[in-house]
Amino acid sequence: MIVSMENTTTSAIDKKLNQLRDQHGVVTLGRVLTLVILAQAGHSEAALEAANFASHEHPCRILVHVAHSSSEETRLDAQLRMGGDAGASEVIVLHGFGELAEPTETLFSALLLPDAPIVAWWPHEVPPPSPHTSSIAGIAHRRITDSARSDDSYETLAELRRRYVPGDTDLAWTRVTNWRIQLAAVLDQAEPAPVREIVVEGSGRSPSVVLLGTWLGTRLDAEVSFVNNPGARRLDRVTLVRDDGEIVLERPGRTVAMLRQPGQPDQQIAMPVRDLNTCIAEELRRLDPDEVYGEVLTAGLRDVRVARIVDTSGELTPGAARFLAEHGGGRPEQEEPAPAASGDDAEVVVALPVPETGREPAAAPSVPAPGEEPA
């Protein structure tokens, strides 16, 4: 059931919800949280679909704010979805124009479930300067962002690192959960041996590559090399270099990974690319801070030792080069291989694309839409 309301108020929306419950027997019992989605006009349906999917596991009230032009006349339009059109939840979509194009705590306060946790999610951008400083985020228990959606993922990751507070999380980290599980299981079963180097290969525009490499490097106390390959924004391969040989976990496609380790036959592992639905469902399973993510984002990016950065795709952005140099022990603005200076922790090799004479550098590819999930 979908009910539309034009030029309305949150008080009128709340009264309409009560009326619909009385008429159709819909109740709010069992709602475990309020999910607030801060979306952009034209891109809200993919996020709403993911939230509806997650609501079957986590019954909730979903509040979606869609920001329209701030230059238009101030008004609030709403759409109420209940029953089969709302999964296991009730959905309120708020279209804000003019002054209401900016989501605020006041706008949502009348519609929040009483005594229920609040989760705020920015599916398309990280609000400046960081997610926990905006009005609605100030009252949220968890704040979900996606650094892979920004124009320069690495600049955004650096900003999230500088301003991190417990409760922040990033879907770029959620997407590497299966990689972490498989790699931890392999090392747990393998013969004890120190890892001398870690090589993480994937898109130079995917922050998941950096987060996974940082986690492995700090946990295994080994140097990390990043190899940036052409193609989709995703992880391709992780290699753990040990004295007894290399352990390689590679996913050439989107569903099956190949595991190679010394003295054992190759194994195929079901490890599909995690779509937006799966990632949001995982994030809603826990409302306490993700301590491992916090450690990786803050202390990990400060302590990780980067052996080298190799760009084979010509897609490594200046922001990525600066980010990896600053947080990986290298030197910013370094475009060609150079010997490590005395006192440097590692040598960083950055092969940035050189534009042809008289031409501007190629524009960065557009940020993927929410349905086009990176891995």
Image (cartoon, helix red, strand yellow):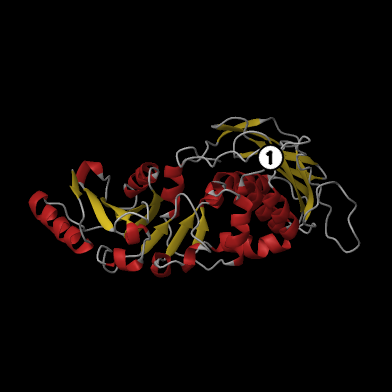
Q: Position of residue 40 (x, y in %)?
A: 40, 49
Depth check, front residue: 37 or 217: 37
Horizontal arrangement in the rendering, residue 351 relative to residue 20 (left or right): right
- Amino acid under disc 1: Glu
Q: Position of residue 120 (x, y in %)?
A: 40, 59
Where on the picture, by quarter, is residue 375?
top right
According to the picture, the residue beneath numbered tag 1 turns out to be 315
At 70% across and 49% down in the image, what residue appears? 318
Badge 1 local density, few (<14 within 10 Å), some, or many (20+)?
many
At 55% across and 40% down in the image, what residue appears? 366
Residue 268 in view (yes/no): yes
Q: Position of residue 105 (x, y in %)?
A: 34, 67
Depth check, front residue: 275 or 186: 275
Residue 34 in view (yes/no): no
Give the SS element for disc 1: loop
Where on the picture, by quarter, is residue 45?
top left
Q: Position of residue 340 (x, y in %)?
A: 88, 55
At 32% across and 55% down in the image, what residue appears? 97
Horizontal arrangement in the rendering, residue 181 relative to residue 344 (left or right): left
Horizontal arrangement in the rendering, residue 52 relative to residue 352 (left or right): left
